[in-house]
Image (spheres, helix red, strand yellow):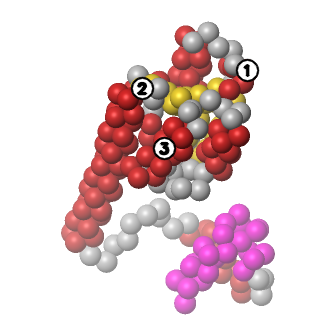
Amino acid sequence: MTKSIACYLRVSTDNQKHDSQRQVLRMWLKGQRLKTDSVRWYCDKISGTTSDRPQLSKLLRAVEKGDVTTVAMTRLDRLSRRTRQGLETLATLADHQCRVVATEQNIDFAGPMGQFCSALFLALSEFERETTVARINEGLAAWRESNPGKSLGRPRNQKKLDQIQCLRGKGMPVTQIATKLGCSKQNIYNALKKMD
C-alpha cells in the first residue's frame, strides 16, 4: 500500500530548496503511520505557472498506470499557480480515483467538500499571483517615471566587461569567451553591443 503514495514538492527557482516542504510531508506521513523511505518523491524546481514540469509529468504518468493512488503535497499551489491548469491536473487525478492531500491546508480531495475547497484555493492562488505581478509592474513604472535615464538591475561588473573587450580584441570567438568567463553567449553579445 505504501508504494501507492507519492509526495510532490515544487519550488520556483534553482536556488530554493524543498527542505521545508519535505519536513512537513514527512510529519504528515508519520501521522499516517507510513514510512518515508517507501513513498515516491517527485521534486520540481520550476515556476508553478509553467506547464512543462518534468517531475509532475512523471507523477501523472505513474497515476495513469495505477502505480500511485494518493498524492500528497504541502499546498495546492505546488500543483499550479493557474486555476485552469490546476483544475485540469486535479481532474486528471480524480479521473484515476487518485486521492489528493494538501497537508498545510487540511484538504483531502477524497470527498465533495475537498473538491470544492481545492478549486477555491487554486483560484485564490492565481489571484494572489496576478495581484503581486500587477503591484510589481506598477512599482517599476513609478520608479522609471521618477528616475528617467536610469536602468534597473544588477550593477555592471566593469572588470568582466574589460575582460570581454580584451578577449574579443584578441579575436576570441564569443562562444569561447562565454565558456571562459562562465556566462551565456547572449550576455557577451549584450556587453559587446553596449561597448560600441
Q: Which residues are magenta?
A: 174-196
- How crowded pointer 2 is (Cα within 10 Å; few <14, some 14-19, many 20+) is rated as few
What amino acid type is highlighted by mark number 2?
Answer: Gly
> Is 146 situated left or right of 124 in this image?
left
Pick the front one: 58 or 9: 58
What amino acid type is highlighted by mark number 3?
Answer: Ala
Q: Which residue lies at the image location 21% right of the left edge and 69% below the top edge? A: 146
Quote the CA–CA distance across marks 1 and 3.
28 Å
Q: Which residue lies at the image location 75% right of the left edge and 77% below the top edge? A: 175
Pick the front one: 119 or 192: 119
Q: Nearer the viewer, mark 1 or mark 3?
A: 3
Dividing the picture into quadrants, the one containing residue 117 is top left
Q: Nearer the viewer, mark 1 or mark 2?
A: 2
Q: Which of the numbered marks, if any, corresponds to residue 20?
A: none
Q: Is residue 176 magenta?
A: yes
Image: 53 above or below 25 = below
According to the image, label 2 marks what residue?
A: 111
Element type where label 2 sits in the image = loop
Q: Which of the numbered marks, if any, corresponds to residue 37?
A: 1
| Residue 15 in view (yes/no) | no
